[in-house]
Amino acid sequence: MKRFSLIYIPWAILFIVLPLLLVVFISFNGEEAMSMEGYRFSMEQYARFFQPMYLRIMWRSVNLAVVSTVVCLLLGYPAAYSISRLKPKTASTMILLFVIPMWMNFLLRTYAWITLLGRNGVINRLLGFIGLGPFDMMYNQGSILMGMIYNFLPFMVLPIYTILQKMDHSLIEAAKDLGANSRETFLKVILPLSLPGVYSGILMCFIPALSTFVISSLLGGNKYYLVGNIIEQQFRLTGNWPFGSAIAVVLIVILLLMLFVVRLLESKNEKGDRRGK
């Protein structure tokens, strides 16, 4: 099995490691051009990114990513827990309802929210029947947040549900036999055992939320730039690949730190489980 897995190492180097190294290499180019001619090693692109304007955009991106991830967790955990307690056939149907929207193109899923939140959209029309509105629900941070939650909520539900399904229910029964009530059983048995799924869900929601640019472009109306929009702009419009690469490297570092923190929490949780045994 180990020998078979060695086959993937060259592919990982070719399609993951080398592109990342190329991005890092380009980010240190002091020339504002996508051509490699006249390459000049410099930290100018990074210095430019740490100007107040770009730091505000980064802060906005991190803030929205954190808030959307927290909301996804608050909505996703109860949903996953409730589904895991259903009969297998019913649970499979409910999970399918979460998965089906993911089969649709990401752009179309996001664009659908314009028909819901627009000034002449479905929600404002329904509110109009009871004499309310119309309200401006589009092109603000709230609409961007709604788009993030809608698109990334399944990434929170699925890993938590998977962990809850695989959980040894004899431990829950043992806790109840020892006199633990429902609240104590959840806090001391179910929640700790489901933390690996929670950590996976947090990563799967936070990473795309931090780097997204489609949601902010469509639902934010280009009024609220996120770091993903800046990277896309540098590569697609201005052709300033070194600056776009520098921002991408900073984003990668933040995501790696996030992975490191989650891994520390997982290790701490595993050590706690061993001590408990």
Image (cartoon, rainbow, N blue to C red):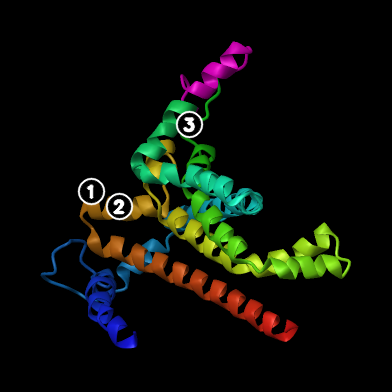
Q: Earlier in the sequence, mark 3 or mark 2?
A: 3
Helix, strand or loop status at disc 3: loop
Report if the CB atoms under discs 1 and 2 are less than 8 Å apart.
yes
Q: CA distance from mark 1 to mark 3?
A: 25 Å
The three-letter amino acid code for the residue at tag 3 is Met
- Report the mark closest to the observer, 1 or 3: 3
| Residue at 62% in and 16% down | 132
Residue 2: image x %, image y %? 34, 87
**Residue at the right extreme, as displayed:** 179
**129 in magenta:** yes
Q: CA distance from mark 3 to mark 2?
A: 22 Å
- Report the mark closest to the observer, 1 or 2: 2
Helix, strand or loop status at disc 2: helix
| Residue on which the image places disc 2 | 232
| Residue at 34% in and 84% down | 1
Residue 212: image x %, image y %? 40, 51
Q: Is residue 65 above or below residue 19?
A: above
Q: Is residue 55 above or below residue 271?
A: above
| Residue on which the image places disc 1 | 237
| Residue on which the image places disc 3 | 138
Q: Is residue 261 above or below residue 226?
A: below
| Residue at 46% in and 19% down | 120
Density class for disc 1 (Cα within 10 Å; few <14, some 14-19, many ≥20) is: few
Residue 231, image quadrant? bottom left
Q: Quadrant of the C terminus?
A: bottom right
The three-letter amino acid code for the residue at tag 2 is Glu
Q: Which residues are magenta?
A: 117-133
Does any portion of residue 115 appear in the rendered image? yes
**251 in magenta:** no
221 left or right, relative to 158: left
